[in-house]
Image (cartoon, rainbow, N blue to C red):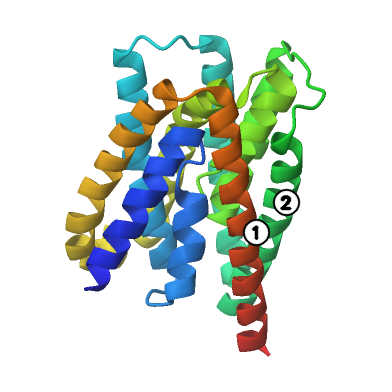
Amino acid sequence: MLQLIYAAVILAATTLGAFVGLGGGVIIKPVLDFIGAEPRMQVDFLSCVAVFTMSIVSTCKQIKDKTEFKKNIVILIALGSIAGGFLGSFCMDMLEGTTDSNIIRCVQAFILASLLSAVCFYVAKERRSFRVENNIVIFFVGLSLGFLASFLGIGGGPINVAVLTLFFSMNVKESAVYSVAIIFFSQLSKLVTMFAGSGIEAYSHQWKTLIFILPAAILGGIIGSGFNRKFDDKIIRKVFTFVMIVLVILNVYNGVNYFIAAN
């Protein structure tokens, strides 16, 4: 029964992730935290696998549909996000050795709620943006995105969308496509770090769950990328903003619960 609930959550999350560039992890992690059936490390693993799978499917579909990419932006941000992903995982491993798990989850929830509030405020209306072309700056943008995605265990989608619209003068529809492509690399680095640190054996008991969530993630990637091509920027912006508001509320709720549990 629990696997079916996870599959439903991941189908909805990855559909929205591919549709508006959220990635899905920003939905999956707080919802699975709310369900409370898995420890933090296992939640991060399931979220990472689902989002990674979705990003492969969605990006392949966009390439097949001949969606145009500015390759230098994707490559430089991807390289930065890989480095940032390793750095974020390293910092989280350091924290886990010295800090209570509930405190870590509380901090993650409140940082995420704050970031999503800022993202929602920026994306809800078209605001001033820049057109960054310096390769070093683009790389460090990717480094920051990869660090946050890995440290918070979310994939980084909504933050990617806001940053891409701010620094590269993209609309939400365009940035959603780039966001999912970048998520592929950040989640790849996170998976490598997870397996290198804990070994595959630490997650081997999740094979039954993966049987349910992988098809859900694949289907979500197909449906979401199809929606992205079908709907215009105005609709995507509204869906994105609504989901952000719901997630801010959920993360604040989770953060309060973890704070109470830790004290």
Secondary structure at numbered mark 1: helix
In the rendered view of the protein, which quadrant contains the C terminus? bottom right
What amino acid is labelled 2 in the image? Ser
Of 140 and 68, nearer the camera is 68
Residue 230 x %, y %: 40, 23
Label 1 belongs to which residue?
Answer: 248
Q: Is residue 142 above or below residue 8?
A: above
Q: Residue at x 19, y 61 (%)?
A: 207
Residue 214 visible somewhere in the drawing: yes
Of 23 and 45, nearer the camera is 23
Of 67 and 99, nearer the camera is 67
In the rendered view of the protein, which quadrant contains the N terminus? bottom left
Mark linked to residue 109 = none
Q: Residue at x 23, y 65 (%)?
A: 4
Secondary structure at numbered mark 2: helix
What amino acid is labelled 1 in the image? Val
Residue 43 x %, y %: 41, 64
Residue 6 x %, y %: 31, 63
| Label 2, residues with CA under 10 Å away: few <14, some 14-19, many ≥20 | some
Residue 42 x %, y %: 38, 66
Label 2 belongs to which residue?
Answer: 117
Q: Are marks 2 and 1 in contact (CB under 8 Å)?
A: yes
Q: Is residue 216 above or below residue 248?
A: above
114 sits to left or right of 80: right
Q: Residue at x 43, y 77 (%)?
A: 36
**Furthest-bottom residue in view?**
263
Q: CA distance from mark 2 to mark 1?
A: 7 Å
Q: Residue at x 38, y 74 (%)?
A: 38
Residue 49 visible somewhere in the drawing: no
146 sits to left or right of 134: left
